[in-house]
């Protein structure tokens, strides 16, 4: 069984809540749950699988704690890691930059040589543009607690199940 870290940044606790739910679904794996606000590099390096959560705060803008950490994140040697991404956004007010943060982090991880798991079909989401949509699929799990909170639990559960074959 692989060791897992769930690392998130969250300003109004939506991503934090999602991270905690993901951790509950993965309790058999005893994941380490980390707030990126703590500024620790060790959780990124010490685990086989990283599940990274970032909300979007404006076009090209990561959540504040992710922004503060990003220059260090870019320097981390994460080559060979398996990574799954999730992100909170608002598809109604920000339909042209919906969950862009997932796309931004994804691009950095691809440059580092990570294996990305947990792609998601855009079916059922309503938006015009997302940097997280690559070749017709989301490269991580988009969640929208501002408009579709009633779908969050179901989306998380389905997504975590899709990750499990990669975690043993
Ligand atoms: C000023 C502001 C800008 C935002 N910009 C975006 C955006 O560009 N794209 C998007 O999908 N969501 C955007 N959002 C929505 C947040 O990402 C969303 O509320 C999310 O749930 C916040 O998660 P957090 O509490 O974990 O930080 C924005 C929200 C605010 C208040």
Image: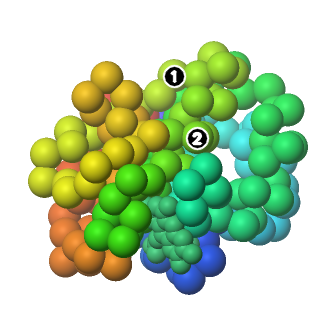
Q: Which residue is mark 2?
A: 104
Residue 109, how many percent across, how many down? 62, 29
Mark 1 is surrounded, within 10 Å at the Cα level, by few (under 14), some (14 to 19) or many (20 or more) other residues, namely some
Q: Quadrant of residue 27?
A: bottom left
| Label 2 SS | helix
Left or right, residue 43 beside residue 61: right
User: Residue 134 location, x and y as percent?
Assistant: 37, 28
Mark toward the start of the polypeptide (2 vs 1): 2
Q: Which residue is mark 1?
A: 115
The residue tagged with tag 1: helix, strand or loop? strand
Q: Residue at x 58, y 65 (%)?
A: 57
Residue lying farthest to the bottom in this orientation: 12
Question: Few, some or many C-alpha atoms within 10 Å of disc 2 (few <14, some 14-19, many ≥20)?
Answer: some
Does any portion of residue 41 appear in the rendered image?
yes
> What's the CA distance linking mark 2 and mark 1?
15 Å
Near-viewer residue (138 or 113): 138
Would residue 144 be seen by someone viewing this image from the given angle?
no
Q: Nearer the viewer, residue 164 or 136?
A: 136
């Amino acid at each position: 069984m692989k060791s897992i870290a769930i690392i998130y940044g969250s300003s109004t606790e939506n991503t934090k809540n999602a991270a905690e739910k993901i951790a509950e679904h993965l309790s058999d794996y005893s994941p380490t749950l980390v707030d990126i606000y703590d500024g620790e590099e060790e959780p990124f390096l010490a685990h086989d699988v990283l599940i990274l959560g970032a909300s979007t705060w404006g076009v090209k803008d990561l959540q504040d704690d992710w922004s503060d950490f990003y220059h260090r994140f870019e320097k981390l040697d994460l080559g060979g890691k398996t990574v799954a991404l999730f992100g909170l956004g608002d598809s109604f007010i920000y339909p042209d930059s919906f969950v862009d943060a997932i796309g931004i982090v994804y691009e950095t991880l691809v440059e580092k040589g990570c294996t990305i798991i947990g792609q998601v079909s855009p079916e059922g989401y309503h938006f015009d543009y997302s940097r997280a949509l690559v070749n017709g699929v989301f490269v991580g799990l988009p969640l929208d607690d501002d408009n579709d909170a009633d779908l969050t639990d179901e989306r998380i559960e389905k997504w975590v199940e899709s990750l499990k074959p990669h975690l043993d």
